[in-house]
Image (cartoon, rainbow, N blue to C red):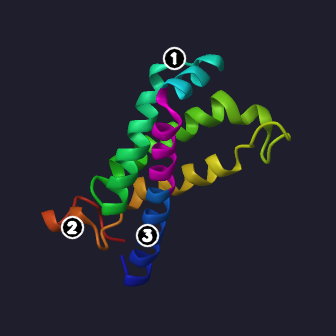
Amino acid sequence: MNGKTEIGLLIVRLVLGVTFLVHGLDKFQSGLGNIAGWFESIGLPGFLAYVTAVIETVGGAAIILGLGTRIAAALFGVLMIGAMFSVKFSAGFTGNGQSAGFELDLALFALSLLLVLTGSRYLAVDSLFGRSRQTES
């Protein structure tokens, strides 16, 4: 990939990583028990709150560092699909006044999918471990 593309992917990687890291930290600061209770109130198992918080926090930090970017991005994609199907679609694209819509989740899913497909090696810890298996365009 050319330099401009790699810089663009770095920007996507950093924005996605910070977004998920902050959301994960917020879950811990809000009290995982509270988040688990909310998950249960919408029909999801409470333990998924803990799984989600860990994926968001650890995955966010990993993506910022460029460590396991494709794996973390794939997990983020799964989280966003889950959020859209379990909560967000019923509120519509932009929301219904009581609940946020799925537009942000869709955008985060698309950014995650981009990183799953392309990776991001510029200023990435993974690039210190040799050439990745990604194909050059």
Residue 137 highlighted magenta (yes or no): no
Instruction: Indicate which disc, 1 or 3, sits on the residue closer to the N terminus.
Output: 3
Q: Secondary structure at mark 2?
A: helix
Q: Tell me the amino acid under the disc marked 2.
A: Ser
* Residue at image point 70% right, 44% down: 102
What stretch of residues is rendered in magenta? 19-32
Q: Tell me the amino acid under the disc marked 1.
A: Pro
Q: Tell me the amino acid under the disc marked 3.
A: Leu
Q: Which residue is tagged 2?
A: 127
Q: Which residue is tagged 1?
A: 45
Q: Secondary structure at mark 1?
A: loop
Q: Residues within 10 Å of mark 3 (few under 14, many from 20)?
A: many
* Residue at image point 53% right, 37% down: 30
Q: Is 136 located above or below residue 109 in the figure?
A: below
Nearer the observer: mark 2 or 1; the answer is 1
Instruction: Indicate which disc, 2 or 3, sits on the residue closer to the N terminus.
Output: 3
